[in-house]
Amino acid sequence: MGEDGYMEQRVIGPPGCGKTTWLSRQVKRAVDNGQGVLVASLTRAAAAEAAGRGLPIPARNVGTLHAHCYQALGRPALAVDKKNISDWNARYPEMSLSSSDDRIDGDNLEDSGKAPGDKLMASYQVMRARMATAYPIHVDRLAHAWTAWKAESGLMDFTDLIEQCLDSVPAAPGNPSVIFLDEAQDMDLLEMSLARKWGEKAGYLVVVGDPDQNLYQWRGSDPEVFVEPPVPDDQIRILSQSYRVPKAVHATAVRWIERTPGRMPVEYYPRDAEGEVRRVSATWNQADNILRDMQKYLDAGKSVMVLGSCAYMLRPMLARLRRDGLPYHNPYRLTTWAWNPLQSSRRRITPKDLVLAFLRMSEEGLWTADDMRHWVTASRMAGVLKGSKGALDDLTDTGGVDWDKIHNLLTEEAIDAGLSGDLDWLRQNLLASRRTGAAFAIRVAEAHGAATLSKTPQIITGTIHSVKGGEADVVYLFPDLSFAGMNEWIGKGQPAVRRLFYVGMTRARESLILCQPASSRSVAL
């Protein structure tokens, strides 16, 4: 089809209905029919999930809408580079910006505005996302300075990528005949305008999402752009069967989301399991109470997700988990040590790998080449290793590592500590917390044994934004629905609050535990 035969199909997928699986099948079907396909997602995490499904299209054809624009515009220099932001801050200290530019997951919302220009820039970008034609005076001043600085420096920001493509790039990269737009409920008006322009050129645009799961109004998204303009009923498909949400959780979540003003009703069915919804009298800063409550689920081998609306709500829980050596992670976050302490390292080696290699010396008495490589990479310091860098690197070239090689690598003190499994020696000599990030891994091994390090953590922690698309057997949700919390929560407004906590509730495969204070002034879910 060409521009005259354009069709837009809208696919609504409520929680756990297999949107990504459905999308993957449709991509494969389109390829089998000889069609060129482009897949665009809102976030890098969503794009990575789609790419991980083994889609039969080139890797460059799966990515965020911004990434596709970046490719289409010839990979221009970006203003958000730390060096460029430093230049801006030097020129305009009164409007200086924080160096962190990735707040798409909402984890850092409570920390925004640290630099003088952060809130102004956020307002400016939201207005651009909504395609505003005029700005308030205070925003207009930043807009003029920012535009002039970018032009002088030959730079573009992320919104420029979309605007430039909307103005001057008639077709998506590779000139596909079908475009799939994933997580479209979180697209803003500017992004959807570009997607539809490219879709008209392609002939067929498939818009996949769920307006009830819109989470990014704070960055300019609007669930209305998903459903407007209207399309014929035969171009709307609802994936009506949830494979995740049990009956009790479904009933609670639906009662909650149905009270959203102006919501488009969407009927879907829970999976055939009763499930459980409980209320626990506890607030986000009562980590001990929550840990005691969740222990029965952990003992039963269940995965447990602990969610808050903002990252600060999880700090007491994270502190307690680190203190007790209880492993946790957020597999839906691609980076950040705070959420994945056993995986992240500045030296491209996971802390748990280093600790496990050390303990294998005492348990097995023989290292693999990978074990040796971990130590060569992470342990170049006086008193631990001996020999030149080249000689140490040569030791990792073979598959097996005998004791002669280990003696050539490590000092006698290090070998003695390894053979005895002396983790305290490891902590002291590797300066783990500063150089390898292994301090938490050591604590886990001390508290629960080395075998725990080799397992996937049962506990998942994160903001509701950061686990979008994720799930667990059990979900603990800290809604903070006190009247004060509702009023002070970044001015989101009731519909946004309802959608946020709806997403949080529907991560649960079996049990949903709502953690709220026992107060007459709390707003019950």
Image: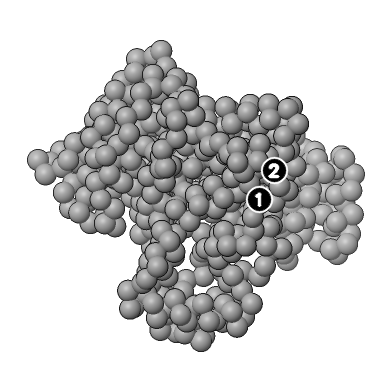
> 47 or 130: which is nearer to us?
130
| Location of residue 6 by image quarter | top right
Visible residue check, residue 208 = yes
Residue closest to the far top? 272
Q: Secondary structure at mark 2?
A: loop
Position of 129 relative to 463 (above/below): below
The residue indicated by pointer 1 is 172
Which labelled disc corresponds to residue 482? none
Look at the numbered discs 2 and 1 and tell me whether their residues touch, using CB distance below 8 Å: yes
The residue located at (34%, 42%) in the rendering is 500
Image position, residue 194 (x, y; %) = 55, 53
Q: Name the amino acid type tagged 1.
A: Ala
Give the camera-side residue of 115 and 477. Answer: 115
Q: What SS does tag 1 mark?
A: loop
Q: Any mark on residue 176, and which?
A: 2
Q: Nearer the viewer, residue 343 or 128?
A: 128
Residue drawn at the location 89% of the way across and 59% of the way down: 391
Q: Where does the N terminus fall, quadrant-wise?
A: top right
Q: Is residue 511 above or below residue 134?
A: above
Which residue shows up at 27% across the image and 39% down it? 262
